Amino acid sequence: MYLLKLTVLEWSRSFRFNNKGGGGQRDFMWLSLMICLLLTLALLVWSSREGVLNRFVDISLGYVQGAGVPIWVAANILDGTAIDNKMLSKIQQLGKKKFSGGLTIYPYREVEPRDVSLPGWSAEKTYSNKENAPVVWAVQANDPLWREKNVANQNISDHEASNSYLQVLLNRPVFAKQFRCDQYRKALEAELTQVLLDQEPVKFTEPLACLSNGWIWLSVNLGGFREMHRFSILWNNTPIISLERVVMLIPLSTYHAIKLTANNPDISFPTTAPGNDLFRIKKLILRKKPEKNDKSTMSGFTKCMTTGSWEGDTLHFPIPQLQSRIAGCAHANAINLVTHTKKDKTYAGLTFYGNAKRLSPPQPESDSIFKVHCASLNDAFYPMSECWKKTDWAKLDVVQALGGYFRALAYVENRTNILQAVDLLSKLTTAQLQEQHDAGTQTALYIHPAYFDAMVRFDFINQIIDGFQSPYGTIFGIFLFVVLWSQIGLILHNRRRDYGVLLANGFRFKDIHFLLFSQLFLCVLVAWLGALCSIGIVHTILLFIARDLVVSGNFLEYLPISELNLLPIDIKVLIYSLVIGWMATWTVAETLWQIIMLGGSRNGPAQLLNE
């Protein structure tokens, strides 16, 4: 215990402000400072190497936190092979076997403006070239693009948040450049009833001010007609990582429900939480007092609905309409709306009848499997369901009905496995996926050429940087050896007399050995902590510089600045640096101890005291 106290006391004397030399000289302080500078330099070089390689990959191909580098793959349509659930599972299994970190793959669908669009946005009227149209994808609920950490809900009610159908993720930087509040509001005026329109913001002081209430209206194609639905907004403040500038993401279950509804008009689009029955109106009957006029008084209501045809006193809708829409138009035109159960013969207005037996919302058990009413399916979808079991309700796999997926993103968690992953996916054959030797050798997937070009550049830069390791490592090793040899040798030379006093007072050589090496370890530990602080300061400065560069250079809509880490530090590298620093110090110190303290004949107390 006394020896440990003496170790700390003697070592700390080198760091005292009022040190006046003598036995308390600053040799340990200078050794700690030199080791700190060397460790800082080594960590800067290593982390800069990793930062350059990682950021080159991230900027070229992208990187999604928690998933890895995305690889864009497409089904090889030349041989008719589509991406199905079996293929997705097989690819992930092969990825686990081939390299560490594995390979995850998530399908997505490109959403055409004719399926889902902002009010007033259409491929025919607004975009003369499809390349100018906003890019919208439908992704799975567990897709990394959907569940990124920087996504934040804004003003979403509990009911809407629980309803995955009514959510949309918007890329704020890109969306703000393409979105116009005045055009959006003008389109809403032509589509919404006054009751719903009154709920929308009217002051457009900012580009996205009209979305400040936390939702956005989208025009959805439900087969033969378009219908407005309100979606809660999830904002993504950094780019959605892909080879395209994706503006909007919607749940894949929503897209499948839209396609299912569009092809089967007797199935209603789920505007409420799955499992709840919807009430849509198929016809309205005009009821009037004797002094009231005929259905010509309903012209404002009919114009508001924009659909329907009169047969006598009955208004028929070709596609069943939402009760909320009918109620809004009735309110806007001061028309009473009552149910068919009301018996008051003198009550003027419209009586609505609902035909809910065949109008049922799809209830998904996954992103693609829906529970539907068999009587609601048309002849094309009926054979793909289980309705042949003579049941009223059956399951339907919309992916099978639509012919599978044609796009997917495969994620490689470890950047060093990108080359192997691209090679694996590009050489995957239908025979491997189907596990049949006679299935042919056609390539199952198509890899975008941008990946092969990026891989060549990445491999070239990697080999150049690896070529620098040998000369840099040799120079650094020589520098480290010279510094340690000179500083530790100076410590032993300056303290020989002190060690002679300790020997004369009954200390043994092994006690002095423990004393010296404990003090050297404290020097290395303090130097390592100082290097960590230095790296942390440099990392923070570089992070601010990188963010300012991205913002000032208008790169915000292209680069994920939240992940632009130019100086990544791995905890393993930090631990290795401490271990290597101590091992080098111990080796040099032990060599000098044998030479200076134990070598020759002048190593007794008297000889050391006479130094």
Image (cartoon, rainbow, N blue to C red):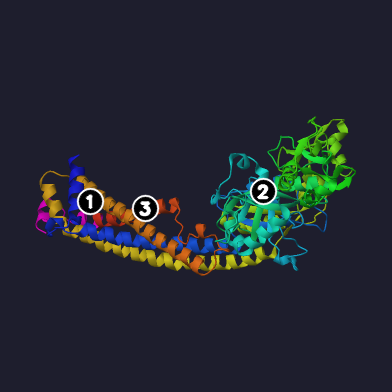
The residue carrying mark 3 is: 578
Quadrant of the image containing the C terminus: bottom left
Identify the element where label 1 is drawn.
helix
Residue 429 location in percent, x, y? 76, 53
Q: Is residue 499 magenta?
A: no
Name which of mark 3 and mark 2 comes first in the sequence: 2
For image coordinates 55% across by 56% down, the residue present is 237
**Looking at the image, residue 190 lies above or below residue 453:** above
Q: Is residue 580 visible?
A: yes
For image coordinates 67% across by 54% down, the residue present is 409
Name which of mark 1 and mark 3 comes first in the sequence: 1
The residue carrying mark 2 is: 196
The range drawn in magenta is 594-611
Identify the element where label 3 is drawn.
helix
**Looking at the image, residue 546 lies above or below residue 605:** below
Which amino acid, by three-letter code, is at mark 2?
Leu
Classed neighbour count for the residue bearing mark 2: other residues with Cα under 10 Å, few (<14), some (14–19), many (≥20): some
Name which of mark 2 and mark 1 comes first in the sequence: 2
Residue 346 appears left or right of 586? right
Which amino acid, by three-letter code, is at mark 1?
Leu
